[in-house]
Structure formats: structure tokens, C-alpha cells
Amino acid sequence: MRRRDFLAAAAGVAAVVTNPASALAATEQRPGAAGVPDLNLGDFPVVARVRARKALEHLKVLSDKIGPRIGGTASEHRARDYLVRELKSLRYQVTTQPFTVPDKYLADINGRWQAGASRFGALGATVKAPFVEVVDGQLPDLTGKIAFYVNAPAGSAPTHAAIERGAVAVILGRISATASKSSAFSPALDRNVTVPVIGLAQAHTEKLRAQGTGELTITTTHHPNLTSYNVIAERPATFPWRDNGVVMVTAHYDSVPGSPGANDDGSGTVLCLELARVLRYLPTHKAIRFALWGSEEQGLLGSRYYVNQLTPEEIARIKGVFQNDMVATSHDPATAYWLLSVDGANNATTAEVRAAAQRLGYDPRVHGPVARGSSDHVPFHEKGMASANFSWRGEGGPQLLEPIYHTPEDTIRDNISLERLQVSLELIGAAAYRLASRRE
């Protein structure tokens, strides 16, 4: 670290610790906490400075402005460019890591709704026509019309039947019989057809059914030869004469088709951006590395690619990976903050978050560690690195996700709690900083 950066770090710590207003704010009982905090000296410059509302400004860009960020497509690239600009403005050493990903098949309805397109249907096509809901399999004459099915028992047979009756496109919608809502999907068919076939999310299926009649414009697009990107930002240790390793704070910035991904995982992404702002000058014995993964929703592709490129020496330097996936839902029953390691065992990351929860007074809300994969901590665990995923879920278990998970309703308005985002920022910020501040 350059001398002026070291002085900035020292000044940052001193300003918080010696400023009565900041110190008082940090020692007050936190929103949603069970007790008054008992902070270590190193907690003050983090807890007193992290702001969920600052993180929210980034989320407005990712979720509201860019919207669905589909791995490898232009939408994910726009998010990548935004993240790179923000992290460079904070004076991090920023690199992007490209990797290839599978083709995408997407559809657009009336320029407003994104859906999945079947790769067996017509691609690169635009159809404008009235739609007709097919009820109980009773097929009217569909010549020049769009056939609309809700919960068709099998995709192929209804699709072929509608095309035989003259349909120029087929919409397959799903309405779940459970509390969880259905997301957009790319229908699988048993053979190729000559018209567009799309899979619609429940929220849009319900709106279309309520509309009853009208004209739709459907456009399908095949996205081939795709490249997705990881965004890596690092600041070195304050004391570079001894290598004490690296602490990583991570999230994925892509989303599923049709979903703006405010909570999954725009929330984890903006947590990383806000902690990058707060931690950029604080003195540490370890380097701090932020990693924002592309194409997580396709099978952890970005994090797996990253881990597979690491040498044994680089793996040995990583002392902990704090993965943040869905850290701000406003779903009422999601009152438990879960520590999720792949094997359910405690490690450096879960231990530090648990200790931070105790110091901050959040401990009763923190559950685990318990065994759960399904996020970007998995590849690190498989290579023997201390890692865990951190997330707000239901009290009954980490499998209890909000019903609008992976749907068009995963928006800031419908699915973001600033209080829970603030708790997440404080817990991960305090935990990661404490681990990075240790000499060992």
C-alpha cells in the first residue's frame, strides 16, 4: 500500500473512533438486534460507515435500470461494465475473467415481459396476433392466433395440437399449486416446430389470463457463442512485507430469465460494492478481494471457472470466502440469517460471522452452520478452502425461500428490506474485516 493510502486508512479509522456521533451511532442497539452491541475496536470503522441506502443506489441500476441479467448476453455485460466502473472508481485493482457459456433462448412479449423460448421452436421470429386461451383441451380454430395454455399437462402434445389448428405461436404458462410461484422457462419439445413456443412466468401468466383478450407481439431470440465474465477487484494488505493471504467477499450478479434479480442476487452484489467502499482504506494484514460471478444461475459456471484456474499456491493463500446470495428479502417469514457451509461444519467464515453477530447483538437471528450447497461457495469448498453462503431464509430451514424467488416479482419494491440488507452489511463487513486484520 502506498504511503498516502496508508495515511488515508489510519485517518479513516481515527475519524470514526474519535468522532462522538459516529461512535455513539455504532454503539446503539441495531435495528432488529436483541441487545446492545459490544464492539471490538476494529468493528467501529465498518459498522459506523456501512449504509444500506448507499447499496440501494447500486441496486436501482442493476435491478430497475438493467433488469434481468442473463449470463453471457448483453444485459449481463451492461451489469459487468457498471461493476467495473464502480470498483475502479474506488481505486481497486480490477480485472475481468471471460469464460464461455451455453447458448440462450429468450422471448419478449410486447416489449415488456421477458420469457424463455424453446430451442425447438422458431427463433429470430416476430409474431403479432391475438391470443386465445385453450381451456380443458377444447381447441377452437386457431388460424392466425396465438394459443395460450395454462398448466398444460405436457408441452409437446398441446403445442403440436395448437399448430395443427393454425396457431402462429404457442405460450405455455404455469400457475403453481404451492405457495412458490413459477418462473419463466424454455419449453422442451419432442421435435422441431415452425412457430415460436415460449414459457411464461406465473406473474405474467396470471396477468395474461386476467386480460382475457388482446393482441400480443412475441419476439424470440437465439443468443449463440456467448461469453460471460467474472469481475475481480482487489486491494493489497496494508503491510505487504509478509504475505498473510487473501480474504474474499463474493456474490453473483446474473439473474434468471424474466427476473430483475433484486434479491437474487442483486442484493449480494451491492453488498460487495458497499463493503468495497467501506473497506478500501482500512488497514489489514491480508489482501481483500471482491469477486462478482457471472452465470451462477446456469450451474455456478463463473465461480467454478475461477476456482479451476487457481494454482495450489493461490488456493493456499485464500483464508476465507464469504459468499452472499439473497441477503435482503422482505418476505415476512424470512427472519433467520443462515450460515450455510457445504458440509454443515464450522469454518473460518461461519465462525467470524457468528462472532460478529454476538458482538453486534444479532445472535438470536443467526442460525447454523447447516449443510447446504447451491451457491458459489461450493467450488471453493471442493478445493478445501474455508467458505460459506450467507442468506436470509425462513426459520424452519434454509430451503424456505420467498415465494417470488426467480420470478418477475423479485424487484426492489416487492422483495427488498433495507433493514435486512443493513444487518447483512454489518455482519459480513465486521466478519471479513476481522479475518483480514489477523496476522495468521
Image: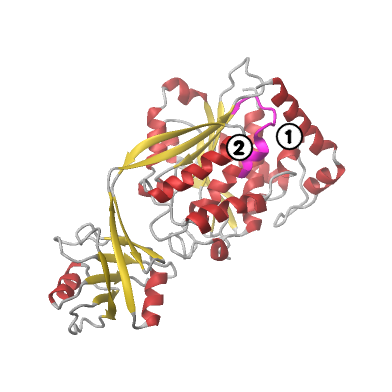
Q: Is residue 297 above or below residue 239?
A: below
Q: Quadrant of residue 427?
A: top right
Give the quadrant of the N terminus.
top right
How far from the left and from the top, in percent, is residue 281? 68, 31
Residue that numbered label 1 is attached to: 42
* Quarter the C terminus occupies: top right
Question: Does residue 397 show up?
Answer: no
Q: CA distance from mark 1 to mark 2?
A: 25 Å
Q: Position of residue 157 (x, y in %)?
A: 16, 71
Q: Quadrant of residue 165?
A: bottom left
Q: Residues within 10 Å of mark 1 (few under 14, many from 20)?
A: some
Q: Quadrant of residue 190?
A: bottom left
**Amino acid type at mark 1:** Gly
- Residue at x-position 20% and y-position 72%: 168
> Is residue 384 toward the left or the right of residue 235 in the image?
left
Residue, x 48% and y 42% (percent of image)? 81
- Along the line of sight, which residue is nearer the eye, 213 or 384? 213
Mark closer to the chain start, 1 or 2: 1
Query: What residue is shown with label 2?
Result: 89
Residue at image point 80% right, 48% down: 25
Task: Label 2: state its secondary structure.
Answer: helix
Coloring scheme of the render?
secondary structure
Disc 2 crowd, CA 10 A, few/some/many (<14, 14-19, 20+):
few
* Residue placed most toward the observer, 35 or 122: 122
**Three-letter code for the amino acid on which mark 2 is drawn:** Ser
Is residue 338 inside the magenta stretch? no
Would residue 63 be visible to someone looking at this image? yes
Which residues, given as a range, are shown in magenta?
A: 274-287
For the residues carrying marks 1 and 2, which lies nearer the camera in this image?
2
